[in-house]
Image: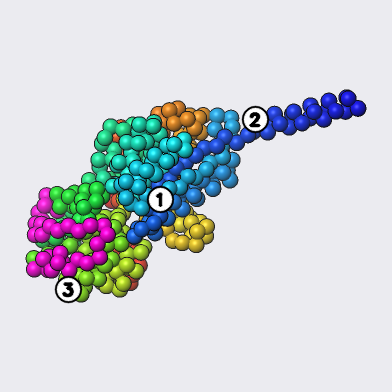
Amino acid sequence: MQVKLNVVVAAAALIAAGTASAQDMVVKIGHVGPTSGAIAHLGKDNENGARMAIDELNAKGVMIGGKKAKFELLAEDDAADPKQGTAAAQKLVDSKVNGVVGHLNSGTTIPASKIYFDAGIPQISPSATNPKYTRQGYKTAFRVVADDTQLGGTLGRYAVKELKGKSFAVIDDRTAYGQGVAEEFSKAAKAAGGTIVEQQFTNDKATDFTAILTAIKGKKPDVVFFGGMDAVAGPMLRQMKQLGISAKFMGGDGICSGELPKLAAGSMGDGQVVCAEAGGVEGAQKAGMEKFKADFKKKFNADVQIYAPYVYDAVMVMADSMVKAGSADPAKYLPVLAKANYKGVTGNITFDEKGDIKNGALTLFTYKGEKREQIAVVR
């Protein structure tokens, strides 16, 4: 009986040892975006991109340093508010996350980046475009999209050279993103020979633009540029139509969403709106992006808004760096992440010494019959 018992105990010990050796190591990935408030549709889109990556990594059974990794998503809402953004960042640091993907807005990403840097936690923003984010000297800060210098600059040049605009009215929403992209647009438009005839500003919660637009109407600009998000751009387009302003309307990635036609409620003329999105795929990469969009739709019963593929790639490049480093310890995989060379859905991901994506693409879009149409991919 004793022998039998010893055999059972030994067998149980072997099973336990086997379980321990194959025991999951938990890897916590934080994601922050505005999942409440006016741009919650964009925040949810980003969060779903992270969720898709996490689910795929767990389905694959990724091994890190000889252990099976179980990835967990810690999702936080910053409501596009800088104070809430830093609180969310601190919460993730306290939860001992291994890495963070976020935030969506420059206004929340920049203050949060100091908290992640102080804690030594790698942060990849999938959508914050203000140049300041990667120019603070934080070795933990990366982004997988082109910045406002490229975004606003490309739109400014395009407005003069391709749209043949001569006079421009510029409005921004006073956020880090809106102001940044509007300044870069103005600089590039002026350098290309255009004239800024009016400059106005609003805020990211505003709904009434009558006074601003009336001042602009008197100047008869060829193009109105708005630095801000689609939730403000939609009502602005409606009021432009009411006031009989038929100028072209331009903006950055913040307005370049699938929701804009709904928010504008039928007030957009075909080809009237031209916007640019940081990122873009060409040629052979298109098939991979189309597959991603189809898989995303099947999983979440929702179309990709803007940045879900960039969030997905950000999670994947982070996980890939952990695998290559043989560790999910931020201090150990951070140097590997800085030297990443990863083929993602959105293109090849490599970073420069600041943490910016190298050779970042931009895609120009317009809208026809309430559908977004690609004009060109530029680098």
The residues bearing labels 1 and 3 have C-alpha atoms spaced at a distance of 37 Å
Label number found at residue 243: 3
Distance from Cα at disc 3 to Cα at disc 2? 70 Å
Give the magenta range.
189-218
Q: Compare marks 1 and 3 and give the one earlier in the sequence.
A: 1
Asked if 318 appears above or below 11 in the picture, the reply is: below
Q: Amino acid at mark 3?
A: Leu
Name the residue at 50% across, 56% down: 295
Q: Is residue 20 above or below residue 281?
A: above
Q: Position of residue 25 (x, y in %)?
A: 57, 34
Q: Earlier in the sequence, mark 1 or mark 2?
A: 2
Q: Which residue lies under the disc numbered 1?
A: 77
Crowding near pointer 2: few (<14 within 10 Å), some, many (20+)?
A: few
Give me the residue at 23% from left, 57% from top.
203
Q: Are marks 1 and 2 in contact (CB under 8 Å)?
A: no
Quarter of the figure with residue 170? bottom left
Residue 237 lies in the magenta stretch: no
Distance between the alpha carbons at the discs numbered 1 and 2: 36 Å
In this rendering, position of residue 190 left or right of residue 206: left
Q: Amino acid at mark 1?
A: Asp
- Residue, far right: 1
Please tell me whether residue 241 is drawn above or below residue 60 in the rendered image: below
Q: Quadrant of the N terminus?
A: top right
Residue drawn where x is 30% and y is 62% of the image? 231
Q: Residues within 10 Å of mark 1 (few under 14, many from 20)?
A: many
Upstream in sequence: badge 3 or badge 2: 2
CB within 8 Å, label 3 to label 2: no
| Horizontal relation, residue 330 to residue 379: left or right | right
Write down the residue under mark 2: 21
